[in-house]
Image (cartoon, helix red, strand yellow):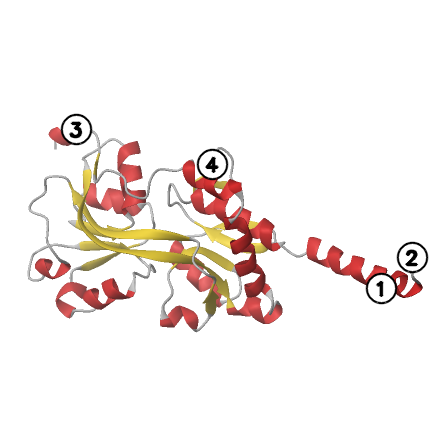
Amino acid sequence: MHRRHACLLPLLLSGVARADERVPLRIGWSDYPPFQHKGATEAPQGLDVELLELLARAAGERLQWLRRPWARQMADVAQGELDLIPAATPTPQRLAVGEFTQPYRNERVALMGLAGAGPAPRRLADLKGRAVHIGAIRGVAFPEAVRRELADPALAGLMLPLHANDLTLSALRSRRVDYVIDDPVTLLHRAGQEPGEAVEVALELAVSPVHVYVSRRTLERQPALMARLNAGLQRARQQPEWGRVLSRYPSYWPPTHVGNASDSAGM
């Protein structure tokens, strides 16, 4: 080996070792099937978990999954106690304490209600002046077009915050709320798994991309992290396993009416 190259070899090897020994990135997860949910062990499973593990490996990173309610995840990113949040929607407020990777999948947003509860609204504005409550998970950000509609005081006054992801279905079936705004994939998934009244999409509101949200405090320590994550995403998308992961999960466009007919008939 040339003497100059021999002198450089320890430096190159030490750089590889540092990449292999990076501290795992702390990433939040919550009960949001089929995207994120508890598996047979304490480890999370779901579409987001599988896709982002592929992304992380392609980026030369490791992930440490930490279970947190959605609203707490945002606070933990701001305080530097989490590095990443999956399935996040950009807002001006969030950009103050973090940045967003390129999108890695799309997410639907819909107004959901109990099947047969009444005529479906043609738009959110049709609910103004009605004696109804609309639930939404506390801390969730909707696409800009939906946020603009909900900023109307006549609609904002109908909103009721729900404090955890798994409360949307129970809030509907217990009549705490008349509607919820959520990703219909997860709510219909739950309705199909748990006995009770059927649930349906009352109004499709938006389809929007979601991103990995990266703490600004983390980026201050690792300035090249965002570039590594975005490059890893592009490499991961080109791997056959990315398509195989997607094929293992239900369609993003499931039937709009899911539930147990015998259960709903008795209500």
- Label 3 to label 2: alpha-carbon separation: 75 Å
Amino acid residing under circle 2: Met
Look at the numbered disc 3 and give the secondary structure of its residue. helix
Estimate the x, y position of residue 82 in percent, counting from the top left: 52, 59
- Circle 4 crowding by C-alpha within 10 Å: few under 14, some 14–19, many from 20: few
Q: Residue at x 52, y 41 (%)?
A: 240
Q: Are marks 3 and 2 in contact (CB under 8 Å)?
A: no
Amino acid residing under circle 3: Ala
Query: Which one is in front, 31 or 101?
Result: 101
Q: Tell which circle, 3 or 2, labels the residue nearer the N-terminal end.
A: 2
Estimate the x, y position of residue 106 in percent, counting from the top left: 36, 52
The residue singled out by tag 2 in the image is 1
The residue singled out by tag 4 in the image is 39
- Label 2 to label 4: alpha-carbon separation: 51 Å
- Circle 1 crowding by C-alpha within 10 Å: few under 14, some 14–19, many from 20: few
Query: Which one is in front, 241 or 153?
Result: 241
Look at the numbered disc 2 and give the secondary structure of its residue. loop
